[in-house]
Amino acid sequence: MESEKSNYGAIMVYFTKPSWAFLVLLVTVIAILSLQISPKAIILPFPLFPVPGSSELDFESDFDPGSCVATFGELPERKHVMSLKDFGGVGDGKTSNTAAFRKALDYMQRFSEKGGAQLNVPQGKWLTGSFNLTSNFTLFLEQGAVILGSQDPEEWPIVEPLPSYGRGRERLGGRHISLIHGDGLTNVVITGNNGTIDGQGRIWWELWWNRALNHTRGHLVELMNSRNILISNLTFRNSPFWTIHPVYCSNVVVKGMTILAPLNAPNTDGIDPDSSTNVCIEDCYIESGDDLVAIKSGWDQYGIKMARPSSNIKVRRISGTTPTCSGVGIGSEMSGGIFNVTIENMHVWNSAAGVRIKTDKGRGGYIANITIRNIMMERVKIPIRLSRGSNDHPDDRWDPKAIPKIRGIFISNIVSLNSTKAPVLAGIRGASFEGLCFKNVTLLGLSPNATWHCEFVSGCTNAVFPLPCPHLQNNGSSTCCS
């Protein structure tokens, strides 16, 4: 087992995806423009795994603010380590391994309270339908290992809709389960030596394109009602729907991931924390047909009723592109509330939007205390966007009087090169969209007549080019943009 144990160190290597040269460019451009950057170190309010000898998480004063996984050092060593081959797995890319994965997990759950278990997936191509994880468990993909999602929809069973959505996101009724799934789990690691999980999502995209879906598509990985989760050092490809979806979870780290989908693949969001708290997403490279990262918390009256917010979320050192959507989206499903979010040190290019906050009538809920800073954008159509009017509701019982509230959005140290349009900030009549702060924001490449578009919003600015709309020229305020 020495070879398996030695693999643990692989995920601790610092993530160096396609070039962080943009950070040098960012600093240079900002210096030239005489913008002052003084980002403060962030101390996450939670550690991520129990320290040896303890059953609960306990904050450590020497927590490294540069990485979410620094405090627990080595990955938890499971006492029971087996290979998928031990359960009859065949890695030829053709033989179904659904039974092998399910048999392995059924066997390994007996060790949940006996030192935990680890399932190693060796080099090869392992075709499988959906399977469920267990607690105190590590799924480890060795170098050259590829898990392939079955192209038989029957191997993605139908499960109940999420209570905060009230129905499947795309179709009424239930939804297809994710390829890798877990519910009510504790201490789960999905990692490896840069192995790959490929959802082979084209058949699902074609069903969507042809309007032939009977049920909402499945995610690549979804964990529900779970805590202490680490997903790291792997490549995820071709998800049928959203790629990584932690929902009703706490203490989640997604680190050092490469997430890829064709740029026209519908709704292939990269990472979507949903009604979850204490989440850290860092050092990832993402190309997708939708938002790279989207923070959510339920849909209209169902999300309002459940009232399960997303909070204490860090998104940092993410780079990527999405021609139809945004680098980071907040909403539009935000009915349970979203607060205490920090997004920083991102590089987004060739995208429809850099940062986008999405909401609408009927959503209710709130978005508050959002910090977005140190973002470099290149050839992004609309660098900053606050949008409304998606007219997207689960059923006819949504409440048009349920109006969202937005307050305390702090956006600073933004450089956008070769922008197409000035920011669009479209609030909702009668709603509270206030306390918007823009500081050290420089948008280059706009046509001389490009202007900010603002409706039903208020806030202030400091060192912003081009000149913002009158709604935001409250520069004398001592409380908004200090």
Image (cartoon, rainbow, N blue to C red):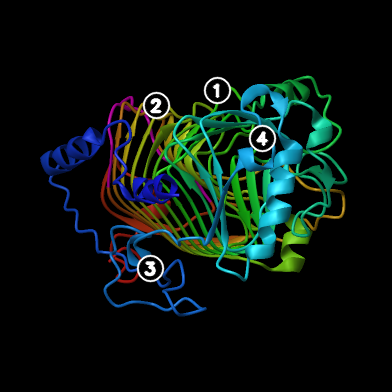
Residue 73, given in percent of the width and then of the height, sits at: 34, 62
- Residue 143 or residue 14, whichever sits in front: 143
How far apart are the alpha carbons under marks 1 and 4? Answer: 29 Å
How far apart are the alpha carbons under marks 2 and 4? Answer: 51 Å
Mark 2 or mark 1: which comes first in sequence? Answer: 1
Decide if residue 110 is on the left or right side of residue 122. Answer: right
Residue 152, given in percent of the width and then of the height, sits at: 79, 27
Residue on which disc 2 sits:
420
Residue on which disc 4 sits:
89
Q: Residues within 10 Å of mark 3 (few under 14, many from 20)?
A: many
Q: Residues within 10 Å of mark 2 (few under 14, many from 20)?
A: some
Which residues fall within the magenta stretch?
Answer: 441-455
Mark 2 or mark 4: which comes first in sequence? Answer: 4
Q: Secondary structure at mark 4?
A: loop
Q: Amino acid at mark 1?
A: Pro
Q: Quadrant of the C terminus?
A: bottom left
Mark 2 or mark 3: which comes first in sequence? Answer: 3
Q: Would you say the residues marked 2 and 1 are in contact, meaning their CB atoms lie under 8 Å apart?
A: no
Look at the image and tell me whether residue 161 can be seen. yes
Residue on which disc 3 sits:
44
Q: Amino acid at mark 2?
A: Thr
Residue 89, given in percent of the width and then of the height, sits at: 66, 35
How far apart are the alpha carbons under marks 1 and 3? Answer: 34 Å
